[in-house]
Image: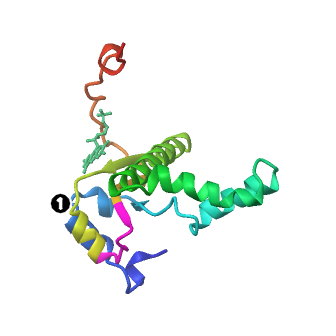
Amino acid sequence: MEAQNCPRYGTEQTLRALAFDQPKVTEAPVILIVLADREGWKLDNSTVENTFNDFVQSGKMQAEQKEWFAGVTQGLYGRDEMAAQAFANKNTGLFAMSLMYAATANGLESHPMDGFDHDGVRKEFNIPEKYWIPMLIAIGHLNPGTEIHPKGWRQSFDNIVLE
Ligand SMILES: Cc1cc2nc3c(=O)[nH]c(=O)nc-3n(C[C@H](O)[C@H](O)[C@H](O)COP(=O)(O)O)c2cc1C
């Protein structure tokens, strides 16, 4: 959707201002506001509904098990706010990284951004309260002649594996 032409949403210029004036927000041809749905585990969510229906159709589950299924999702993700937030972050983080790999595989550059005013973006783009906004992602081609910094510091095997 052309955000600029849609009065419900802010423009890419307002997004750039809310992202501490980072030039890539307006320079990249595509800028994604990534949303994490804190209620995405609920039974009336279309993904959950489709997943459950698929389980039933493929014989992995019985239709009578819907209440049990609802209880499991409630127990895992609906028990408190932190569980719901963790659910949203885990799924959206996996999605965002996959999207960035897919962009790279298709010859595109992508850049995640944490540097933005969360509440400002929510307000300007009418983002409902159930969503948290983990990051913005700019996607596009590198301008010819642009040099990317060499890869930064990386944790070692010993840093990340606990024995
Ligand atoms: C969660 C997250 C948020 C980031 N936010 C910003 C940002 O707001 N602005 C920015 O220029 N880079 C941002 N970066 C990108 C990093 O600065 C860096 O360019 C990128 O992670 C590549 O790191 P490397 O140099 O170690 O390969 C962010 C990265 C991550 C993982």
Q: Where does label 1 land, which residue? A: 20
The spot of residue 119 in percent (x, y) is 23, 68
Residue drawn 26% across the image and 52% down it: 114
Residue 154 among those drawn in magenta: no
| 153 w.r.t. 107: above or below | above
Looking at this view, is 127 or 21 the one in front? 127
Horizontally, residue 97 falls left or right of residue 56, namely: left
Horizontally, residue 39 falls left or right of residue 23, namely: right
| 21 w.r.t. 97: above or below | below
Q: Secondary structure at mark 1?
A: loop
Horizontally, residue 50 falls left or right of residue 138, namely: right
Can residue 146 be seen here?
yes
Q: Residues within 10 Å of mark 1 (few under 14, many from 20)?
A: few
Residue drawn 50% across the image and 41% down it: 101
Which residue is the extreme one toward the bottom?
A: 7
State the image quarter where residue 116 is shown.
bottom left
Residue drawn 37% across the image and 46% down it: 144
Residue type, label 1: Phe
Can residue 13 be seen here?
no
Answer with the quadrant where ligand 1 appears in the image: top left
Residue drawn 37% across the image and 74% down it: 128
Looking at this view, is 105 or 153 the one in front? 153
- Whether the residue under disc 1 has CB within 8 Å of ligand 1: yes
Identify the main secondary structure in magenta.
loop
The spot of residue 150 in percent (x, y) is 29, 29
Q: How many marks?
A: 1
State the image quarter where residue 161 is shown.
top left
State the extent of the magenta-drawn residues as a range.
124-132
| 95 w.r.t. 162: above or below | below
